[in-house]
Image: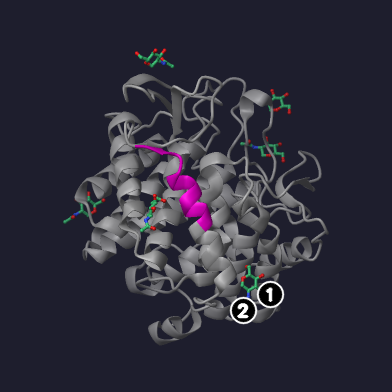
């Protein structure tokens, strides 16, 4: 649920009315009919057995397809749910909302076998998003497109869908099964030496499924696991300057930190997920430490953004040769900052909310203008998956 289409959605539901605050408007591309047209075209290419788009080639922007048991398989179905919600809220799309919902359901179905057999590790959390979308009633405070009353009515999909309930609970149990009480975290990556317990900052995004399953089952152990994981991550992944390590290796026998390191270079999209993850933890727990951490990480992001507003694949990479941009990091950070803005609003900090929303709009404007490619299958170009492996300047399903 972290795509350009979703930023559009978040701006429609989480943003602050521009008329009320005098903000600059979001870039017009966000509301272009091309958004719906491109997503629909991809949606209509569902195959049997299904394959899921992850990123595009670098020249023509055509999707490269992956098997369903991949950490990214949930993003496209979740984008379809986002289109459903966007249509309901904004009412501007040519495709009807019910059609988006049907497509979202059809595209989720291929993920069901991963409930019992999966190699994605902690990323079962990412696989859960479309199923959580099927069940979810979103809470939000303001809406760009419509007024309050509409929101409360349109946001239900099917909160009683048994297939989705089962998927959320199965994925949550799978993630909970990766929890070590000694380390205090869920294991992100498996490793050859099982005592080398690797946790990556991205794991913060996967905690949502634990809260969703707690809400469905009343099992508070799942919440306790999420809180323990976030508390440890706050101490060991987040640096004093608000930056973050990508990977922390713990010793599963002793719980001690073995090393803090990066993988794939620094990779800014990792940091962006941290902003979202801690704002989300605050939303669920109201623990002030999480809000402070999200703010600190947001500050690092905003301070390190270059003056042209283009997010590079790595803030610390040398300027020569030119650093490839990462529009996916920009879109993920936009989501994180909007969620943080929502949290500020929830404590009536209108100044804080206005500040983050204005930063988001600036970032969207610069990065969308750079990466907008009408002919590409993805919504945006200029995404970087893994620069050390030369996977740069593509369209990315989690950022586009
Ligand atoms: C429930 O969700 C599943 C998986 O997303 C979908 O295949 C199914 O059509 C949905 N059923 C109903 C009754 O909405
Ligand atoms: C709650 O969830 C935990 C973690 O998955 C599990 O070990 C425990 O059995 C569950 N409790 C109940 C009552 O289902
Ligand atoms: C973890 O600690 C145990 C006990 O001290 C040790 O045998 C093991 O090699 C350590 N593992 C790693 C990956 O450092
Ligand atoms: C954006 O992508 C295009 C190729 O699609 C490339 O020529 C350009 O250099 C990229 N810009 C940045 C800042 O990465
Ligand atoms: C409002 O939000 C800003 C930005 O996060 C923060 O610096 C400030 O302390 C917050 N004010 C209050 C009263 O919480
Ligand atoms: C981007 O990827 C291409 C090959 O896919 C590689 O030649 C180039 O060095 C990469 N760019 C940077 C700045 O690392």
| Residue 372 in magenta stretch | no
At 67% from the left edge and 25% from the top edge, which residue is drawn? 389
Label 1 CB less than 8 angstroms from ligand 1: yes
Establish if 313 lies above or below 27: above
State how many labels appear.
Answer: 2
As rendered, which of 29 and 131 lies closer to the eye? 131
Across and down, in percent, residue 106 comes to 71, 68
Across and down, in percent, residue 167 comes to 56, 61
Q: Secondary structure at mark 2?
A: loop
Q: Report which quarter residue 323 is drawn in.
A: top right
Q: Which mark is residue 92?
A: 2
Across and down, in percent, residue 226 comes to 35, 48
Check disc 1 and report the residue beneath it: 102
Mark 2, other Cα within 10 Å: few <14 / some 14–19 / many ≥20 = some
Whether residue 219 sits left or right of residue 348 in the image: it is right
Q: Quadrant of ligand 3?
A: top left
At 66% from the left edge and 69% from the top edge, which residue is drawn? 105
First in sequence: mark 2 vs mark 1: 2
As rendered, which of 316 and 185 lies closer to the eye? 185
For the question of whether residue 31 can be seen, the reply is no
Whether residue 3 sits left or right of residue 348 in the image: it is right
As rendered, which of 189 and 331 lies closer to the eye? 189
Question: Magenta part mainly helix, strand or loop?
Answer: helix
Mark 2 in CB contact with mark 1 (< 8 angstroms): no
Q: Which mark is residue 6?
A: none
Cα–Cα span, label 2 and label 1: 19 Å
Q: Nearer the viewer, mark 2 or mark 1?
A: 1
Looking at the rendering, the stretch of residues picked out in magenta corresponds to 170-180
Mark 1, other Cα within 10 Å: few <14 / some 14–19 / many ≥20 = some
| Residue 178 in magenta stretch | yes
Q: Secondary structure at mark 1?
A: helix
């Amino acid at each position: 649920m972290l795509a350009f289409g979703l930023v559009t959605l978040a701006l429609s539901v989480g943003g602050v009315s521009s008329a009320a605050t005098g903000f600059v408007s979001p870039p017009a591309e966000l509301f272009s009919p091309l958004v719906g047209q491109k997503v629909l075209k991809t949606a209509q290419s569902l195959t049997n057995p299904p394959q899921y788009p992850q990123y595009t080639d670098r020249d023509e922007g055509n999707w490269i397809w992956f098997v369903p048991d991949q950490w990214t398989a949930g993003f496209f179905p979740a984008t379809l749910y986002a289109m459903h919600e966007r249509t309901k809220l904004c009412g501007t799309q040519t495709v009807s909302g019910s059609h988006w919902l049907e497509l979202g359901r059809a595209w989720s179905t291929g993920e069901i076998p991963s409930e019992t057999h999966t190699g994605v590790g902690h990323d079962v959390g990412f696989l859960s998003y479309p199923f959580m979308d099927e069940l979810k009633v979103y809470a939000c405070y303001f809406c760009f497109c419509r007024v309050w009353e509409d929101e409360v009515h349109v946001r239900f999909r099917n909160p009683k869908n048994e297939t989705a309930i089962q998927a959320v609970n199965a994925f949550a149990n799978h993630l909970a099964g990766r929890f070590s009480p000694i380390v205090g975290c869920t294991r992100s990556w498996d490793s050859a030496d099982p005592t080398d317990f690797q946790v990556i900052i991205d794991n913060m995004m996967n905690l949502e499924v634990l809260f969703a399953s707690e809400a469905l089952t009343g099992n508070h152990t799942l919440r306790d696991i999420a809180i323990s994981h976030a508390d440890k991550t706050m101490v060991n992944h987040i640096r004093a300057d608000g930056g973050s390590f990508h990977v922390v290796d713990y010793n599963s026998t002793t719980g001690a930190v073995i090393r803090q390191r990066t993988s794939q270079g620094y990779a800014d999209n990792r940091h962006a997920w941290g902003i979202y993850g801690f704002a989300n933890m605050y939303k669920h727990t109201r623990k002030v430490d999480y809000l402070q951490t999200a703010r600190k990480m947001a500050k690092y992001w905003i301070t390190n953004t270059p003056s042209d507003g283009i997010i590079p694949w790595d803030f610390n990479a040398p300027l020569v040769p030119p650093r490839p941009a990462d529009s996916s990091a920009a879109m993920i950070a936009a989501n994180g900052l909007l969620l943080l803005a929502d949290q500020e609003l929830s404590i009536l900090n209108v100044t804080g909310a206005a500040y983050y929303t204005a930063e988001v709009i600036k970032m969207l404007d610069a990065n969308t203008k750079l990466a907008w490619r009408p002919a590409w299958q993805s919504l945006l170009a200029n995404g970087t998956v893994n620069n050390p492996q030369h996977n740069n300047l593509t369209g990315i399903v989690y950022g586009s």
